[in-house]
Image: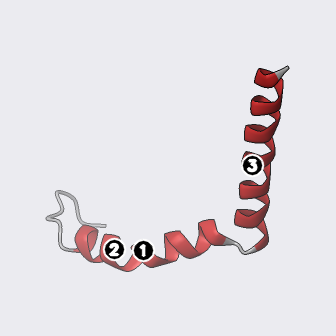
């Protein structure tokens, strides 16, 4: 019975975490934070083919 309580608590915590991430749109905000450094890095890479 104790193991079921632990599993239920972990699943409930995980569910609440995903709801908070969805509600505040945190995944998109995190991507937006790293987008500029990544674009700067990839824009500075040498290209083999020209478009």
The residue carrying pointer 1 sits among few (fewer than 14), some (14 to 19) or many (20 or more) residues within 10 Å by Cα, namely few
Disc number lying in front (1 or 2)? 1
- Residue at the spot of label 1: 35
The answer to whether 12 appears left or right of 32 in the picture is right
- Residue at the spot of label 2: 39
Q: Which of marks 1 and 3 is nearer the N terminus?
A: 3
Image vertical order of residue 46 relative to residue 14, above or below:
below
Figure quadrant of the C terminus: bottom left
Image vertical order of residue 20 relative to residue 14, above or below:
below
The answer to whether 24 appears left or right of 51 in the picture is right
x, y percentage for residue 33?
Answer: 45, 77
x, y percentage for residue 43?
Answer: 25, 73
Q: Do the CB atoms of the residues marked 1 and 2 lie less than 8 Å apart?
A: yes
The CA span between labels 1 and 3 is 29 Å
Name the foreground residue: 36 vs 30: 30
Could you say whether the residue bearing mark 2 is in a helix, strand or loop? helix
Residue drawn at the location 73% of the way across and 55% of the way down: 18
The residue carrying pointer 3 sits among few (fewer than 14), some (14 to 19) or many (20 or more) residues within 10 Å by Cα, namely few
Residue drawn at the location 42% of the way across and 74% of the way down: 35
């Amino acid at each position: 019975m104790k193991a079921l309580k632990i599993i239920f608590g972990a699943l409930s915590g995980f569910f609440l975490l995903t709801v908070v991430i969805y509600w505040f749109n945190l995944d998109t905000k995190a991507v937006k934070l790293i987008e500029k450094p990544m674009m700067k890095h990839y824009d500075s890479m040498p290209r083999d083919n020209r478009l």
